[in-house]
Structures are given as structure tokens and as C-alpha cells.
């Protein structure tokens, strides 16, 4: 039996497992495989910028090829389009309205299941995204064409990266929708999802001007992720995910209307909750909730946060930053691994007692990991070594991570780092040093006689 | 089905008899349905036929027997790792001779694991290969006329025929 003797759906499955460019090779292998290729229900278009200066010609060629492909393969795909993806480039400010309209019409007519409009190199980084000119690489679309898409009966995956609309409230009601991603999209005022009871995953990242997200009837939603746009001048986004009882993962990063009460109310009744991450939330003052299943808790740079009172008996990982030195944390279970980030500045002599007292809250945990920018920042000033206040006697496993060092320290630096660590944790079983960038790891084992 | 039966007998499309344990047969939905059928009770001698040739059926049964313990009880990570290695060895077979027969059989017998494995094996054989290499691996004859090739070349500017 030969490849060509297989029924089309098996050939399509093999094509599906290959990168699109490689799957396209089927079209030139033989006549019979060419016809299998025509009906392959996946269409990808990548706009590849050449070095040519004539951008409008380049665009015209792309558009012509795009239309030809739709005309050629459309009749064979006939309303069973599995995946339609367009990857465009942000290097050039090109407007694509014609492509987008043709794409959406084709997608809707052929009952598309997965639609990706993606800028493949898109990064969403807190430090540089405020500086760049977002408009240069936004795909501008007319909101009329979005209506039918947002109420499609067939859509299961929708990913928009870098799509811009004139000021628009998106109302999405797709009964089969499972995954929704909006990233660096511009112009959406609010995103409202309803009647999408298959929805499992929602991510909204860096959408400028977004004022609110509401998810109604998210019966099986298990992951919700929000990241704000920029730091300084971002719009505060209101989140309503109170109707999502199956939530497992909740990640919020940036300005939201998340208050103490909102968090408590949202998290309280989640029976399957496993992971909570809250970064840069400037309204939160006290994190207080009980959750039996929570495994991972990550709080970072919440500047007003003063207190964390959580009852999470099954927590395995706790991430925190050392910005508020007198943070009382109660009830961390002993099986927990704690990671404390020190990204602002090392604690100096005046605050070293507070620092040690802070760390003594983690006396009983399974492993304590301290992340610094450089290993040297862990070295305590000599004077502070004289007073052995708040040593962590119970802790057995200590890890020290450096975010910028490329290698494990040696010589005198190593001695001084270890001296400070032993001062803090007098009876360790292991001390591990780790470099974040180069992933070097070195572990020291301690054995004690009776 | 009587609980005393531990293995069942099936016929291949070539008419050869094969034994397959009950737990292994459960990997296939249609075989599982057959198991529930009366014809496997002790007092029945009718042997069902599976529309798969002998050579392929040997391999399919080998796969089922290997995977059955894990599928039925769940397994540790080290077992899963071992099984993965076994799968790779198992899939080292002649493409023209048997790979696509296995794929068809897995499809016919609704065996998801074997189906995915066979498709992945075929895809991996193509990855990074040129068109002429793929033709050679899968014994595909280039039946395009030179005019047709020219036309295709225009359609797929990025795709080489060689």
C-alpha cells in the first residue's frame, strides 16, 4: 500500500502533523496527492517581507497569491475549513483591509473552526512596549466584518494578535468557542463573552484602551489571563469573571479594578482552583482567602499590599517579592517551596534585621529559593554577621538564584556568599546555586554526625 | 461475555487464526464491542473476521499486547518512558510494505494511540526532506507532465520540485 492509496482524511492527518510549508510539498509529489492537498482543510498565509523597497508591490503580490489560493482551494474545502491562519509582519506599516475582509468572508462562509490572525514575532514586554509605535503594525479592520465572526456557530479557536478596530465593544457569542486570545489589539473598548459554554481558555494581553472584560456563563473556563498595556498610562480594566466556577488558573498582570473584596469573592468558591498570579496590581492591600486546592501563588510588585492571610493547605509553590518587609504570612504548609525575588535592591545594614525576620516566616517550608539580580547581593555586611538574630533553624533546602550572573561564583565571592547563607540558615541539608540565564546549577550537600 | 475467557480468537482477512488477550483487545473499540457480543461465550465456535491482513494483524496485536497493561492500569513515568522507546523501535518498519497498512488498520479498529503513532511516524519521515527524497521514501511516481509542472511551479513559487 502506498501513501496515495490512503483515504484523504488520513493523508490530511499526516499533513496536519507537519509544518505548513512542509505539508505544501504534497501538492507537487503526484497528481493524486495534489488533489489531496487541494482539500486539506488548513490554510496558512505568511506575509514574508523581502528586502524590496517597493512595499506596495510586495503587498499586491501577497494579496494576489492569497486570492488565488482561496479561489483554487475554496471549492474543495467546501464549508469544512478547519484552520485559517494569517501571519503578517510588523516590520512595515502596511494596511491590509482587503485581505482581512476577504479572509473573514472566506472563513465565515467555510465554517472555520480555528482562526488565527497573528504577528508571529509579537512580544509583549513590560519594558519596551510603551516606547514603540503600536499603530505601525496593527492590522486595521472594519468592525462590520467582525459581527458574523463573533456569533459563529462553528468557531472553536480565535486568536487575534495586533488587530486594530475603530472604537468597538466586542460581543462574542460562539457556542463552540474553546479558546480566545486577544493580544496587542487596539480599539476594543470592552470584550463581552456570553453563550460560550465550551470556553476553556481566555487570554487578553496588552490591549490598549480596554476598559472591561466580562465573561458570562463560563461553565468550563479553566484559565483566565489578563495583562495590561504598558505601565504608566494604561487604562484600568474592569474584570468580571464571577460566572466561571471551574477556573483553575487566574493570572492578572497590570492595572485592573481588582480590589481585596473582588479577589476574595472571585476566588472563594472556586473548587478546582490551582494557580493564582497577581503582578503589578496597585489596588490590592490585603490578600485574604481560603482555598483548599490552590497549588501555586505568585504575588509580585503589588505596591500597596500589606498583608497576606491565606489558608491554602495544599500550596506547593509560593512566589513573592521582597518589597514589603514586614509581611505577615500565616499558614504556609510545610510541603511548600517558597521563592522570594529581590529585584529592587539588596537589604542593607539598616534593614537587615527586618529582612531576616521576614525570612524567618519560612522556617518550616520544604525549600526556600532567593532570587537576586547578582549573587554578590546576597553577601551580608560584616557587622550584621555579629548578631545571629532570627536564624532559620528548621529549613533544610536553600536555593540562591542569580538572574544576571552567567556563572556560579568562585573564590572569595563564593566563600562570602556561603558565609551569609549559613548565617541565615545554620543547618541546611543542601545549598544550591543557580544561574537563570545560563542554567548552571551547583549543589552543596551537608551531612551532620550525631 | 463469560468472565473465564482470557483470550479470544479472530481471523485475519487472509483467513489465518490469531489469539488476542481480552485486555489487549480492549484497546480497540470495535473489538471491545465484539467482546461484549455473544459469539465469544464458551459454547460458540464462530470466529469473527477482522478485515486486516495477517502480516499487519501480527503487528497490531503485538502493539496491543504491549500497551494493554498500561492502558488498563495506568503506569508510572518510567514505564511511559520505556513504552515510548518501545514505540520508536516498533515503528521502524518498511514504509511501502507495512506502515500504511498499520495506519489503515488503526483507523479501522479505532485505536487512537497506534493511529497517532503511525501518522507521526509518516510525518517524521517527511520532515526536512526534499520533494525528490520524499518521492523516493514513499515510492511515489511523479506523474505530472512538464507543462503541468510548469503550472504548479507558478502556483507555488516557494516550492521546489527537486
Image (cartoon, rainbow, N blue to C red):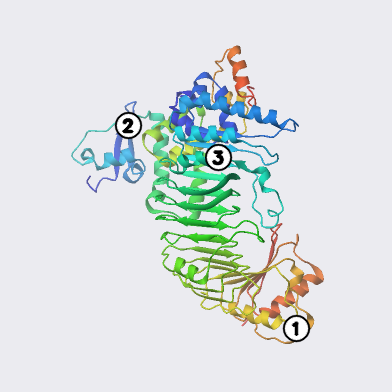
Q: Give the numbered dot on residue A142.
A: 3
Depth check, front residue: A26 or A307: A307
From the image, state whether disc 3 or disc 1 is nearer to you.
3
From the image, state whether disc 2 or disc 3 is nearer to you.
3
Determine the secondary structure under disc 3. loop
Could you tell me how far apart the alpha carbons at marks 3 and 1 are, in whole angstroms? 64 Å
Q: Bin the neighbour count of mark 2 within 10 Å (Cα to Cα): few under 14, some 14-19, many 20 and up.
A: some
Q: Do callouts 2 and 1 mark residues in contact (Cβ within 8 Å)? A: no
Q: Bin the neighbour count of mark 1 within 10 Å (Cα to Cα): few under 14, some 14-19, many 20 and up.
A: some
Rendered-image quadrant of the N terminus of chain B: top left
Could you tell me how far apart the alpha carbons at marks 2 and 3 are, in whole angstroms? 56 Å
- Residue picked out by circle 2: B50
Q: Give the numbered dot on residue B21.
A: none
Residue A403 point in image, percent of width and height: 71, 62
Callout 2 and callout 3 share a chain: no
Q: Give the numbered dot on residue A384.
A: 1
Name the subunit of mark 2. B
Depth check, front residue: A123 or A383: A123
Residue A393 point in image, percent of width and height: 62, 81
Determine whether A446 is above or below B57 in the image: below
Residue with the most extreme right position: A412
Q: Do callouts 3 and 1 mark residues in contact (Cβ within 8 Å)? A: no
Depth check, front residue: A245 or A411: A245
Determine the secondary structure under disc 1. helix
Name the subunit of mark 3. A
Q: Bin the neighbour count of mark 3 within 10 Å (Cα to Cα): few under 14, some 14-19, many 20 and up.
A: few
Residue B80 point in image, percent of width and height: 48, 50
Name which of mark 3 and mark 1 comes first in the sequence: 3
Amino acid at each position: 500500500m502506498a501513501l496515495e492509496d490512503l483515504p484523504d482524511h488520513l493523508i490530511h492527518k499526516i499533513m496536519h502533523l507537519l509544518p505548513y510549508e512542509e505539508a505544501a510539498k504534497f501538492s507537487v509529489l503526484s497528481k493524486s496527492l495534489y488533489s489531496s492537498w487541494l482539500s486539506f482543510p488548513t490554510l496558512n498565509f505568511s506575509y514574508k517581507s523581502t528586502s524590496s523597497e517597493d512595499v506596495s508591490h510586495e503587498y499586491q503580490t501577497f494579496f494576489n497569491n492569497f486570492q488565488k489560493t482561496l479561489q483554487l482551494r475554496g471549492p474543495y474545502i467546501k464549508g469544512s475549513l478547519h484552520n485559517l491562519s494569517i501571519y503578517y509582519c510588523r516590520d512595515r506599516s502596511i494596511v491590509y483591509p482587503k485581505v482581512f475582509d476577504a479572509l473573514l468572508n472566506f472563513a465565515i462562509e467555510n465554517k472555520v473552526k480555528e482562526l488565527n490572525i497573528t504577528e508571529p514575532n509579537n512580544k509583549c514586554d513590560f519594558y519596551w512596549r510603551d516606547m514603540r509605535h503600536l499603530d505601525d503594525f496593527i492590522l486595521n479592520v472594519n468592525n462590520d466584518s467582525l459581527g458574523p465572526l463573533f456569533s459563529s456557530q462553528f468557531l472553536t479557536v480565535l486568536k487575534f494578535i495586533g488587530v486594530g478596530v475603530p472604537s468597538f465593544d466586542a460581543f462574542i457569542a460562539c457556542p463552540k468557542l474553546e479558546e480566545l486570545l486577544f493580544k496587542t489589539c487596539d480599539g476594543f473598548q470592552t470584550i463581552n463573552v456570553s453563550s460560550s459554554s465550551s470556553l476553556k481558555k481566555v487570554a487578553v494581553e496588552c490591549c490598549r484602551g480596554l476598559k472591561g472584560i466580562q465573561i458570562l456563563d463560563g461553565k468550563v473556563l479553566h484559565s483566565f489571563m489578563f495583562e495590561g498595556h504598558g505601565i504608566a498610562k494604561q487604562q484600568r480594566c474592569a474584570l468580571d469573571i464571577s460566572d466561571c466556577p471551574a477556573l483553575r488558573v487566574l493570572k492578572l498582570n497590570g492595572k485592573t479594578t481588582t480590589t481585596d473584596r473582588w479577589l476574595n469573592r472571585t476566588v472563594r468558591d472556586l473548587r478546582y482552583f490551582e494557580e493564582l498570579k497577581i503582578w503589578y496590581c496597585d489596588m490590592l492591600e490585603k490578600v485574604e482567602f481560603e482555598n483548599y486546592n490552590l497549588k501555586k501563588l505568585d504575588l509580585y510588585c503589588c505596591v500597596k499590599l500589606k498583608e497576606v492571610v491565606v489558608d491554602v493547605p495544599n500550596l506547593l509553590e509560593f512566589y513573592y517579592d521582597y518589597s514589603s518587609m514586614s509581611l505577615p504570612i500565616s499558614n504556609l504548609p510545610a510541603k511548600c517551596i517558597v521563592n522570594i525575588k529581590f529585584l529592587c535592591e539588596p537589604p542593607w545594614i539598616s534593614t537587615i534585621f527586618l529582612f531576616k525576620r521576614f525570612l524567618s516566616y519560612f522556617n518550616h517550608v520544604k525549600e526556600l529559593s532567593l532570587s537576586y539580580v547578582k549573587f554578590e547581593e546576597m553577601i551580608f555586611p560584616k557587622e550584621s554577621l555579629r548578631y545571629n538574630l532570627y536564624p532559620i533553624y528548621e529549613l533544610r533546602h536553600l536555593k540562591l538564584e542569580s538572574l544576571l550572573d552567567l556563572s556560579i561564583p568562585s573564590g572569595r565571592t563564593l566563600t562570602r556568599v556561603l558565609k551569609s547563607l549559613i548565617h541565615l540558615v545554620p543547618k541546611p541539608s543542601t545549598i544550591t546555586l543557580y544561574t537563570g540565564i545560563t542554567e548552571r546549577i551547583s549543589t552543596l550537600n551537608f551531612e551532620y554526625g550525631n | 461475555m463469560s468472565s473465564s475467557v482470557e483470550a479470544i480468537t479472530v481471523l485475519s482477512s487472509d483467513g489465518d487464526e490469531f489469539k488476542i488477550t481480552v485486555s489487549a483487545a480492549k484497546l480497540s473499540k470495535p473489538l471491545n464491542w465484539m467482546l461484549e457480543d455473544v459469539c465469544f461465550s464458551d459454547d460458540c465456535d464462530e470466529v469473527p473476521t477482522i478485515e486486516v491482513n495477517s502480516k499487519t494483524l501480527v503487528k497490531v496485536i503485538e502493539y496491543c499486547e504491549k500497551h494493554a497493561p498500561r492502558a488498563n492500569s495506568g503506569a508510572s513515568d518510567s514505564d511511559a518512558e520505556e513504552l515510548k522507546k518501545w514505540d520508536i523501535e516498533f515503528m521502524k518498519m518498511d514504509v511501502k510494505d507495512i506502515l500504511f497498512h498499520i495506519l489503515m488498520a488503526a483507523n479501522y479498529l479505532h485505536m487512537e494511540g497506534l493511529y497517532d503513532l503511525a501518522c507521526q511516524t509518516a510525518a517524521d519521515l517527511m520532515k526536512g526532506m526534499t520533494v525528490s527524497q520524499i518521492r523516493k521514501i514513499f515510492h511515489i511516481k511523479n506523474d505530472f507532465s512538464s507543462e503541468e509542472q510548469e503550472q504548479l511551479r507558478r502556483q507555488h513559487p516557494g516550492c521546489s520540485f527537486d
